Image: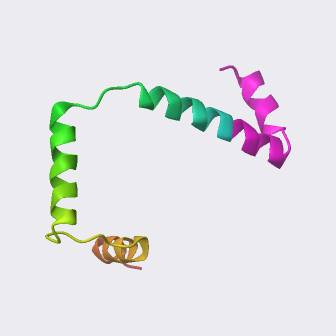
Amino acid sequence: MTRTEVKKILKLNRNDKIKLVQTIWNSIEEEQESLPLAKEHITQLDNRLKKLTQGKSTLKNWSEIKRKFNNHLIRPTT
């Protein structure tokens, strides 16, 4: 992509930029669906699903994951 093309994209209005991003995202998603999963990944996903359905594992909500992640970040001292 050339600089000129990028500049044209950046000049688009907000709605057109959103439509463009959605179109690009959809094309990536379509490509992703055609990629085969590695056998190891399928096995891992199956094991996680089995543990979940057997009650041996639980799901965490996004706010809990963010809190846990943020607690482990090293913050610079001022």
How is this picture coloured?
Answer: rainbow
Residue at horizontal 48%, vertical 26%?
A: 31
Residue at horizontal 27%, vertical 32%?
A: 37
Coordinates of residue 55 in the picture (x, y in percent): 17, 72
Coordinates of residue 18 in the picture (x, y in percent): 73, 45
On screen, residue 61 versus residue 19, left or right, reads: left
**Quarter holding the N terminus?**
top right
- Against 2, residue 12 (above or below) is below
- Compare residues 5 and 13 and report the one nearer the observer: 13
Magenta stretch containing residue 18, yes or no? Answer: yes
Q: Is the magenta stretch mostly helix, strand or loop?
A: helix
Coordinates of residue 24 in the picture (x, y in percent): 62, 33
- Compare residues 27 and 67 and report the one nearer the observer: 27
**What is the quadrant of residue 23 in the picture?**
top right
Q: Residue pushed farthest front?
A: 54
- Compare residues 14 and 43 and report the one nearer the observer: 43
**What is the quadrant of residue 25 in the picture?**
top right
Residue at horizontal 71%, vertical 24%?
A: 3
On screen, residue 27 versus residue 75, left or right, reads: right
